[in-house]
Amino acid sequence: MKMLDPTNKRFISGIYNYCDRWCERCAKTERCYLYAQEQADRAEYEAQGKDPDSDEAAMEMVHQNFQRTLEMLKQMAQEQGLDLDKLAEEAPVERVDPRGQPLCRRADGYRKKASQFLKRLRKTLKTERAGILKRAGVVPSAERDAKTLAEIMDAYEVIAWYHMQIAVKLNRAMSSKQRSEPKEDPEMREITLSDGNGSAKVAYLGLSNSMVALQKVYAWDEDLRDEALALLVEAEKLRKSIDAEFPGHRTFKRPGFDD
């Protein structure tokens, strides 16, 4: 498959490193190399009469992306006069598991509670949708109810999209922070810690978006209020924990988003 030129000026370097991967709702896709490459791959599959959404295509794309990443690393190393094989032999492998850290445990707790809440909300949405379909064209308020339901379904999508990603991003953030602490090289320590702040910021923003969505659900259905409120409290506690653990996330500049 053809590899696009990541140095093309239309792409913002590293924009995909600290995004929420929700391409369908992103206004920056035209400036993203990763998105452009994925779309080019899909178009190539379709031109060959293949289904780009098949498991076979997905596995092949993962392999292609891995190979492209290796080629880019090799090219960068050559330009800087570095021997990757030698560096791999000399550099000790740093293995850290952040899942036992309080912040990561709290994030995982939020994930589990959000998952249970989403099941309940999904059931309620299904019941409400069926009721609106029956009332359509008969009850005057059905059209207004349908519009409200669409807003709540959007809120559901927001909560669902972020609830697992938040834990993943905070695991990465804590992992970066743990790796930065023993480093004697100030420059490398700063780079690693910066990655932690960036990942923490993505998680924080996802939480903030989720809280807005939860507030909509809270106002919409009385039967869901207790659960929505409990999840809002958990989300706010998690945000405060992020502030305490990664104060630098607030000033971190995500390429293409915070410039």
Image (cartoon, helix red, strand yellow):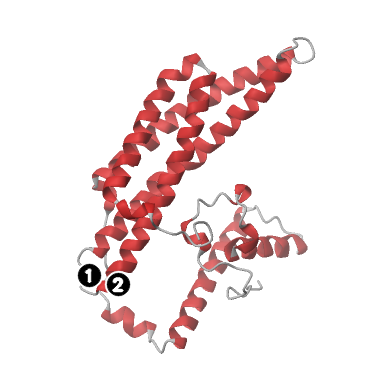
Residue that label 1 marks: 183
Above or below 13: residue 157: above
Name the secondary structure under disc 1: loop
Q: Give the CA separation, mark 2 to mark 1.
A: 7 Å
Report the residue at 31% width, 35% height from top: 237
- The amino acid type found where label 1 is placed reads Lys
Above or below 142: residue 212: below
Q: Nearer the viewer, residue 46 or 239?
A: 239
Callout 1: few (<14), some (14-19), or many (20+) C-alpha neighbours within 10 Å? few
- The amino acid type found where label 2 is placed reads Met
Report the residue at 51% width, 78% height from top: 71
Q: Is residue 148 visible?
A: yes
Q: Earlier in the sequence, mark 2 or mark 1?
A: 1
Instruction: Assess whether mark 1 and mark 2 are in contact (beta carbons under 8 angstroms).
Output: yes
Residue 186: percent from left, percent from top: 25, 72
Could you tell me which quadrant the N terminus lies in?
bottom right
- Please tell me in which quadrant of the rendered image residue 194 appears: bottom left
- Please tell me in which quadrant of the rendered image residue 143 appears: top right
Q: Is residue 9 left or right of residue 90?
A: right
Q: Is residue 183 left or right of residue 32?
A: left
Residue 213: percent from left, percent from top: 51, 32
